[in-house]
């Protein structure tokens, strides 16, 4: 998802736990929220820092593919909407960095890890946004997939993460709906516009399915994260839910999901569908997607180019504070 | 690495007549910028009519591990609640 392939040391059985760990697990099982200053296992803290950090990075890097179209939006209204959406993504990143910071890591440290390639962001943002229809498809599919994952995470065990998710989910629905509204407009437009919408769906369908990550139903990492309630569903469950929700929406648009094996399965009450090409997923995660270098390059450049400004504001704040401070008596 | 901007806690009054409520935190070089950033980060959809910001380092918090002894004194004082008293029905609503 926005945090993909976050691993843990594996699931601990009750008899392997220390009394503190057992009491902690019991609190989670009772549905209690864990707050920053309370005792928590090191693994819980570390996994959460990685997961929330990666999630935050995804929000920030996720601004880039859409930012690409702000200056070229077809109307002033579309431009204002896209600008508001991209600004929301910045906000979502900030909520999440703050949640991560309560675990004892600073935002600048997380940024540095991202810039050095030591922390990841979601694979989806390494794909290019080639046409205006991609703005529709990103909102509809990418934000749609993100919502699938974020709605259950509102119930996650870590208080600050849960609260950030609640704020984010409130705003996320606007993102998906504005995307779908773009798709509706294009799909009911000229044949060329409809073809553009179909092309966007063709290119973004499998990368969207990849967002949920490879099957993890037998993974010990997932089992531990699920026991800690920092992961609420398996990747396969969420992917299935996403497909089941999205296919009728594509049908409404009169667009075709690019999967010849897509078929309603009455017995399971969901669609059968083709898996994405997982070798492509691992390749993108490893840094070889179409836009990895661009995306990270843009982040690093923004950070470096903004250094004088950040430092200038600190210098100004220090001077102003010094002016205000009373002079000590001689 | 250059100096990090300090962390601020943000409190927002959602509507007239309500308390300011903690909504989250953010980084800013000074209080004035913290207010402006808080507006952009936490009130993009009219969520507030007033903002407070306070440096996180200036907040003193009670310790979670002493939660028991800290709040214990009120546990035993059930007579502080109205339901402690049985008032006969004939008396009417009280």
Image (cartoon, coloured by chain):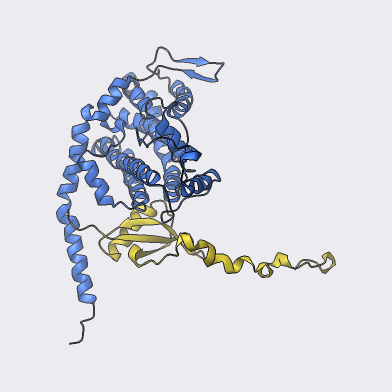
Instruction: Tell me which corner region of the image, top left, top right, bottom left or bottom right, holds residue A216.
Output: top left
Q: For this rendering, which residue is in front, B37 or A266?
A: A266
Return the residue nearer the eye: A117 or B19: A117
Q: Residue at x 23, y 77 (%)?
A: A325
Instruction: State the residue in front, B80 or A151.
Output: B80
Residue A24 visible in rendering: yes
Please indicate whether residue B54 sits to the left or right of residue A236 in the image.
left
Drawn colour of chain A? Answer: blue
The percent coordinates of residue A7 (x first, y second) are: 35, 35
User: In the figure, the yellow chain has which letter?
Assistant: B
Instruction: Note whether B83 is above or below A106 in the view shown.
Output: below
What x and y, as percent, mark residue A133?
A: 32, 28
| Front one among A48 and A86 | A48
Residue A207, image x and y in percent? Answer: 33, 25
Q: Is residue A272 above or below residue A99?
A: above
Q: Where is residue A205 in the image (x, y as percent from the top left)?
A: 36, 23
Image quadrant occupied by the C terminus of chain B = bottom right
């Amino acid at each position: 998802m926005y945090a993909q392939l976050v691993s843990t040391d594996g699931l601990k059985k009750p008899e392997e736990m220390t009394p503190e760990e057992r009491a902690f697990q019991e609190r989670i099982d009772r549905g209690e929220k864990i707050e920053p200053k309370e005792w928590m296992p090191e693994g819980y803290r570390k996994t959460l820092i990685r997961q929330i950090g990666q999630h935050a990075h995804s929000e920030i890097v996720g601004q880039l593919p859409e930012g690409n179209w702000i200056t070229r939006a077809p109307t002033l209204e579309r431009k204002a909407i896209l600008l508001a959406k991209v600004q929301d993504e910045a906000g979502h990143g900030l909520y999440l960095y703050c949640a991560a910071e309560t675990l004892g890591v600073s935002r600048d440290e997380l940024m540095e890890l991202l810039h050095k390639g030591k922390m990841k962001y979601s694979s989806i943002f390494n794909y290019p946004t080639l046409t205006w229809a991609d703005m529709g498809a990103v909102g509809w599919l990418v934000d749609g997939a993100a919502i699938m994952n974020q709605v259950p995470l509102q119930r996650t065990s870590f208080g600050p993460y849960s609260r950030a998710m609640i704020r984010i989910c409130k705003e996320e629905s606007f993102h998906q709906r504005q995307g779908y509204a773009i798709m509706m407009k294009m799909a009911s437009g000229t044949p060329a516009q409809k073809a553009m919408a179909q092309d966007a769906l063709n290119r973004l369908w499998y990368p969207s399915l990849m967002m949920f990550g490879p099957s993890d139903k037998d993974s010990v990492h997932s089992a531990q994260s699920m026991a800690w309630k920092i992961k609420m569903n398996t990747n396969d469950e969420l992917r299935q839910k996403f497909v089941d929700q999205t296919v009728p929406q594509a049908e409404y648009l009169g667009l075709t999901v690019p999967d010849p094996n897509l078929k309603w399965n009455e017995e399971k009450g969901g669609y059968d569908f083709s898996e994405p090409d997982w070798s492509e997923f691992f390749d993108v995660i490893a840094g070889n997607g179409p836009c990895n270098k661009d995306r990270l390059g843009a982040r690093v450049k923004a950070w470096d180019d903004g250094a004088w400004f950040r430092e200038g504001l600190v210098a100004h704040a220090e001077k102003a504070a010094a002016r205000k401070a009373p002079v000590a008596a001689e | 690495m250059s100096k990090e901007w300090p962390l601020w806690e943000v409190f927002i009054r959602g509507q007239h007549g309500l308390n300011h409520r903690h909504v989250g935190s953010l980084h800013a070089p000074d209080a004035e910028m913290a207010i402006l950033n808080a507006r952009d980060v936490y009130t993009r959809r009219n969520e507030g009519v007033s903002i407070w910001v306070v440096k996180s380092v200036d907040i003193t918090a009670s310790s979670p591990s002493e939660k028991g002894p800290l709040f214990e004194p009120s546990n035993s004082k059930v007579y502080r609640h109205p339901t402690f008293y049985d008032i006969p029905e004939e008396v009417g609503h009280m």
